[in-house]
Image (tube, rainbow, N blue to C red):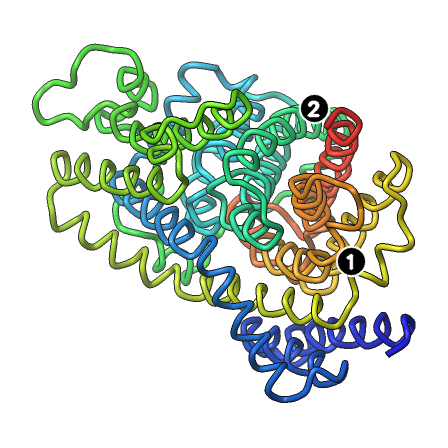
Amino acid sequence: MSDVQVLLTTAAAVLVVVLLVVRLQVNPVVSLVVGAVGLGLATGQGVEGTLGTVTGGFGSIMAEVGLLIGFGVLMGAMLDELGAIRRLVAALLRVFGPQRLPYTFGLALATVLQSIFIDVMLVISAPLARRVAPHIGPAGTARMATAIAIGLETGIVLVVPGIGALALAGLLGVPLGQMLLLGVAVTVPTVVVSVAIMSAVLRRTWDPARDEQPVEVPAAVAAGSPAGSPAAPTAPGGAAGDATGDLTGDAPAPGREPRLLLLFAPLLAALVLIASGALAEVAGLEHPVVLLLSDPVVALLLGVLGTSAVGRATAGRERVVCAVGRGFAESGQILLLTGVGGSLAATVEAAGLGDVLGQYFSAGTSGALAGLVLVWAIAAVLHVAVGSVTISAITAAGVLAPVVPTLGLAPVLVALAAGAGSLFLVHVTSNTFWLLQSLLGQTTRGTLKTCSLGVSVASVVALGFVLLLALVL
């Protein structure tokens, strides 16, 4: 096939996927498989070759990140069941005060709590956000809504063990330790700068009369709230401030909940082990024990075992078993979606798109930066069309994975650029948009300001930091 035919055929396959998801409401997993099979057949790979590529791509990405995604989801489900998320939010309020809460809350969501499902985090965090909003100052509700949206969405696609970040790393062959360190390096300043920009904008543009409405929690959301996640953000004793003792105070009295640091210790230890692996690689340290413990699968497995042990000791076996069962149920579609993203990537590579696009970008600085902007733009367009941050990031990575070797770029930069692009313009096709509207008492007009504009600002800011990284790596 000619270069033009390859480009047009690949674009048509992606368009078919988008139309199936958006117009016909076909499940994204099925849609991506249809797109991959159609592309393989249309580019002359034959029936046998196409099916072999689709299944091989699925198996390859599952070997890379299947266990990691499962372990991350299990830890998140157990922490939710143990009430750790609710207590962390209350502790942040007590320690940092309401004025700094938008920043600290956004950073916590983006860097520590990204293994928790967005819908669950919204149900847990929204009541506190509403409660503290009057103490933050002008546009308090809007600033908290923006911080929540920015923190949740950036963490999911840029920071390990966020589901989108794991999928991007697997599809693009990025070591997880490297993805963790550079993802945090991009995410932290992105959240701070974006929240600061939006705080300034919202102070001038927020109109409570037109942008806010009484809070009405949807019955479906209320009914689906996970066990152990009460709407009220208070710690056991009644006051939100009581949670700070969990961080630095004396041992809990009998009958009180365990220290918050104890609940999060296994997850934090797992992230430290993964990061240490990347640092050991840079330092040239190849000790077998270090290599074993810093391996992402082993590190997250230890995190799961540690969280389970803490949960059994503090909350009982039954609650831990319940949380694990819920985690397995929730991870099913995520694993399938990630796997078929690998199928699409393998089919695109076999079609020769990498060779076609690679010739348009030189290995020099300008070509590299242009390549990252292209990655960002493709993910942004896909997100606007599909309405899912995770799906658009995975699809963009699948399309662009074959191009990475020809760009002369570190694969981690391509992963971060795709993640940044997938954040652009969260809008009315997103479940996050409507949950933020209802749980935080915003009108559609207000949610367009806080969620759509706020996360779009974060998308552009994140791209800027990724381009800065490209100049030094």
Along the line of sight, which residue is nearer the eye, 450 or 161? 161
Q: Residue at x 54, y 38 (%)?
A: 159
Q: Specify the quadrant that holds the N terminus.
A: bottom right
Can the viewer see residue 12 in this picture? yes
Measured as percent of width and height from the top left, residue 37 is found at: 64, 81
Q: Cα distance, mark 2 to mark 1?
A: 26 Å
Can the viewer see residue 447 in this picture? no
Residue position marked by numbered label 2 in the rendering? 196
Q: Residue at x 33, y 18 (%)?
A: 241
Measured as percent of width and height from the top left, residue 115 is found at: 43, 44
On the image, which quarter does residue 80 sit in?
top left
Mark 2 crowdedness (10 Å alpha carbons): few <14, some 14-19, many ≥20: some
Q: Is residue 59 left or right of residue 322?
A: right
Q: Residue at x 65, y 62 (%)?
A: 429
Along the line of sight, which residue is nearer the eye, 394 or 297? 297
Q: Is 218 placed above or below 303 here?
A: below
Describe the element under mark 1 as helix, strand or loop. Answer: helix
Q: Disc number at residue 381?
A: 1
Along the line of sight, which residue is nearer the eye, 64 or 49? 49
Q: Is residue 3 left or right of residue 44?
A: right
Q: Given this view, does label 2 or label 1 mark the residue nearer the observer?
A: 1
> Which badge, 2 or 1, comes first in the chain's sequence?
2
Amino acid identity at mark 2:
Ala
Describe the element under mark 2 as helix, strand or loop. Answer: helix
Q: Residue at x 73, y 54 (%)?
A: 379
Q: Is residue 255 left or right of residue 122?
A: left
